[in-house]
Image: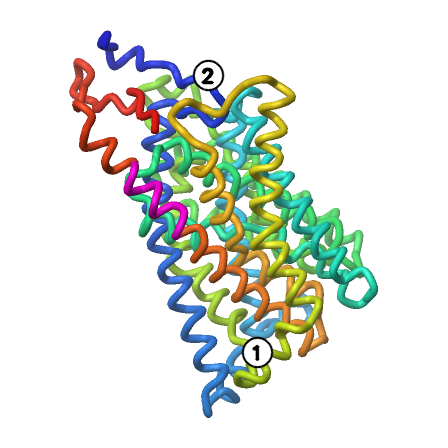
Amino acid sequence: MVKETSDHLPAPRSGLLGRGTYSEVLRVGEILRKETVGGILLVIAAAVALIWANSPASESYFALRDLRIGYAPWHLELSLGAWAADGLLAVFFFLVGLELKREFVAGDLRSFSKAVVPVAAAVGGVAIPALIYAAINLSSPETSQGWAIPTATDIAFAVAVLAIVGSHLPSALRIFLLTLAVVDDLLAITIIALFYSDDLHLTPLLLAFIPLALFTILAQKYRRFFGLKPAATWFILLPIGFTVWALVHAGGIHATVAGVLLGFAVPVIRSRASGGPDAGPGLSEIFEHRFRPLSAGFAVPVFAFFSAGVAVGGWNGFLSALSDPVTLGIIAGLVAGKPIGIVGTTWLLTKLTRVNLDASLKWVDLIGVALLAGIGFTVSLLIADLSFTGSGTTNDHAKVGILAASLAAAFLAAIVLRSRNKHYRIVEAEEQIDADDDGTPDIYQDRTP
């Protein structure tokens, strides 16, 4: 094999879902490690909530979840559950905004040829589950409004499963899963903003642009200052960001949208005047390092704790929930619709563009990841709450569907990916480890099944 210098790493393969650039592989690996811990905490928090909500002490759980705190004149007297859904998830969506902007400005997705596959697959993975749910609930206008529940993918939960069963899977699959989930989150927040926002108030929404503009100007102009001074972020940018969040919340749009807007406001590229490529990471990357532990380790698990607590009502209650079209639509959408939409869209692209799947992958690999995308936990629970506000039984059945579908998708994905992981582990053992001149492992060598 011809060796490459560290300045000229081999180019990614030309097939669909080829390996990303070396820097992207390293960056995604770091993100997935953090999300793995968050996914484990999320599962633990959800399990504790589910057990508590179905225990003899269940009343104390619901009393805690419904405890209201906050300042009423500012429309901020909310239950703890609402604070978790509207407030803490804004931190999660702030990171979504950071990740999306970085991918399309400086990541591999700035190239149309690399972006088209995960973006199209994400669209297919949203459209097909929504159509399946809508078809099952076609005769019931009251339940059909939950069509968006099975469209979301929970990256933390999915990555936790991937880390357990797929340690030797190709990096291309990991990058694809992360990118797919990020685009999926963008589609989800767009759906929330367009279809699950009501009783809009124009004045606070217009006022929100003032602190948002101030946040943007400060982040752009003083990016180096906020990068070097963490305390300045908390004492200057955080109060401005909270003001944006409060005004968006008062305006009737779900406040998590504010998190995405604030994420978009943070610059990705470091200032050329600050030293070029030797100046260190951009502010977006710095913020991602600072706030991802807060999101994965606290915000998302706390939300899961307050949202996943469903009083199933024993075995009979569980069977009753499974017979509800809402539950059936969610399970069918997540477990079947997600892989059909993702794999079907990718297959269609191969036919339309005449570009084959990358030689390092097989379609069964993509099917495994697509099954994993059927784990729709965090955002699905949020959309369920928005869809069936005030409808306790329907909302509970929706959450049973989300939990059951997520567990089923995780189980099926684990079966497929564990088998493929064994294959790639054998391939790695048989390959001769080749290194570049600087000692960097050559992760781009062929690993064709």
At horizontal 48% and vertical 66% (from top left) the residue drawn is 304
Q: How crowded is mark 2: few (under 14 residues within 10 Å), some or many (20 or more)?
A: some
For the stretch drawn in magenta, the main secondary structure is helix
Residue 2 placed where, x, y %? 23, 7
> Disc 2 versus disc 1: distance between alpha carbons?
48 Å
**Is 140 on the left-hand or right-hand side of 53?**
right
- Does the stretch in magenta take in 417? yes
Q: What element carries label 2?
A: loop
Residue at numbered disc 2? 14
Type of amino acid at the residue the image marks with label 2? Ser
- Is residue 267 among the parts visible in the rendering? yes
Q: How crowded is mark 1: few (under 14 residues within 10 Å), some or many (20 or more)?
A: some
Quadrant that contains the C terminus = top left
Residue at numbered disc 1? 318
At horizontal 28% and vertical 12% (from top left) the residue drawn is 7
Residue 16 placed where, x, y %? 50, 24
- Is residue 244 among the parts visible in the rendering? no
Quadrant that contains the N terminus = top left
Magenta residues (range): 415-423
Residue 147 appears in which quarter of the rendering?
Answer: bottom right
Image height of 243 relative to 228, above or below: below
Q: Is mark 1 on a helix, strand or loop?
A: helix
Residue 89 placed where, x, y %? 53, 57
Type of amino acid at the residue the image marks with label 1? Phe
Residue 384 placed where, x, y %? 64, 64
Q: Which of 326 and 24 is in front in this view?
A: 326
- Residue 257: assigned label: none
Q: Which of 364 and 193 is in front in this view?
A: 364
Q: Which colour scheme is used?
A: rainbow
